[in-house]
Amino acid sequence: MTASPQPNPRPRRSLLFVPALRPDRFLKALDTGADIVCIDMEDAVTLDRKDEGRAATLPLFRSRSHPHVEQMVRINGLSTYHGLKDLQALIECEAPPDAIMIPKIRSAEEVHLIDTLLSTGPARTIRFCVIIETNQGLERAVEIAKASPRIDSMILGAVDMSADLRCVKAWEPLLYARSRLVHAAASAGIDLLDVPFLNLDDPDGLRAEAEGCARLGFTGKASIHPSQLGPIHGAFTPTEAQIHKARKVCAAFEQSTTGLVVVDNELIELPVVRSYYRMLAIAERISGGKS
C-alpha cells in the first residue's frame, strides 16, 4: 500500500501574467518569487499586434534561467487564425516554453488535437494548463482534465465564464463553477488555479478571495502584478502547524500495517494521508527554492 502523492508535485500557488508586448518584464517577473510566469499572447495583445507579440515572446525561452519557475505562454484559441499560427510557431520552436495555457477549451477532443500537433520535436515536452471559461467546458470539465497526461493544471476564466452563465462575476454566483472545477482537478490529480483578482487597490479583497479558494480546494491563484503575490502565497503556503501535523501523520502511517492511523485522537485514512504527503513535498520544494 502506498500513500505517495502524484509524481514530482511542484508549487503552483501563484501565476504572474506578463504582456507579450512587454518582453522586458519577463526576467523581472522571474525574480518576483512567482511559482509560474505566464506570457500572455491572447487577451494582452490586440488583434493587429498578434504577430508582433508572438515574435517577441518565443525567443525568450532560449535561456533556461530560473529553473525553479515554471515558464508558460498563453496562446490564442484553437479556433482562431492566430491560435493556429501560435501552434505552428511552437512546433517549429527549438526552445519552447515549459508549458502553454490553452484558452476556450470546450472538449477533451480539442486537447487531443493540440497534443497530437505538438507531439514531435522539442514541442513534445510542452506541458498544458487548460482554461475553463465556457459553459461547455464547465459541463465537460472532468473529461477535459483527464484528456492528456500533459495537463498539469487547470485555471478558471471567470470573466468569460460569468458571461456564458449569465451571472455576476462575484464569489457567490461563481461558487458552483469553482466547486465543479475542484472536482475535475481532484479527479485528474492536477493543480487548479483561480482567476486573477483585478483590483490592485484592494489587498484585503484579494486575500479573502485567495483564502476562500484555498479552503474550497484550489492550489493557487493567478495575478496581474507582483504586489499580489504576498497575499496569494499566504493563502496557499502550508503553515508550520500544518507541516508539523503532516510529518506526524506520515510518520505514523509509515509505521502502520493497516492503512489507518490515529494522530492526536483523530482517525486518518489513506486519502487524507496522501494529501499530507503532497503537502510535505510542496513545502520542501518551496523551502528549497527549486523546481
Image: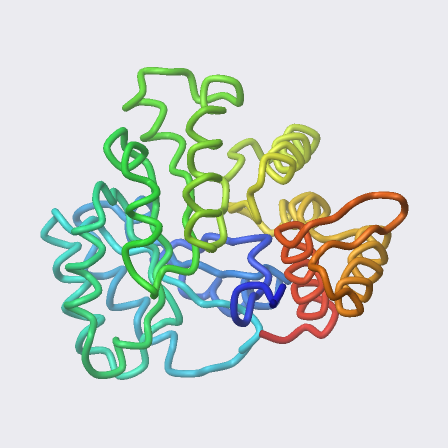
Position of the N terminus, as image quadrant, is bottom right
Instruction: Using residue 17 as the reference point, say whether residue 241 is left or right of it.
Output: right
Residue 36 in the image, given as x and y percentages of width and height: 51, 61
Instruction: Using residue 181 as the reference point, say whether residue 47 is left or right of it.
Output: left
Q: Residue furthest front?
A: 258
Query: In the image, what residue occupies the spot 30% across and 71% down?
Result: 58
Residue 76 in the image, given as x and y percentages of width and height: 23, 51
Position of the C terminus, as image quadrant, is bottom right
Query: In the image, what residue occupies the spot 39% across and 54% down?
Result: 19
Query: In the image, what residue occupies the spot 19% across and 61% down?
Result: 114
Query: In the image, what residue occupies the spot 21% across and 83% down?
Result: 121
Residue 265 in the image, given as x and y percentages of width and height: 89, 44
Residue 213 in the image, given as x and y percentages of width and height: 59, 36
- Please determine whether, in this image, residue 1 is positioned above or below residue 80: below
- Please determine whether, in this image, residue 164 is positioned above or below residue 2: above
Disc tally is 0
Corner quadrant of residue 71: bottom left
Corner quadrant of residue 180: top left
- Please determine whether, in this image, residue 99 is positioned above or below residue 182: below
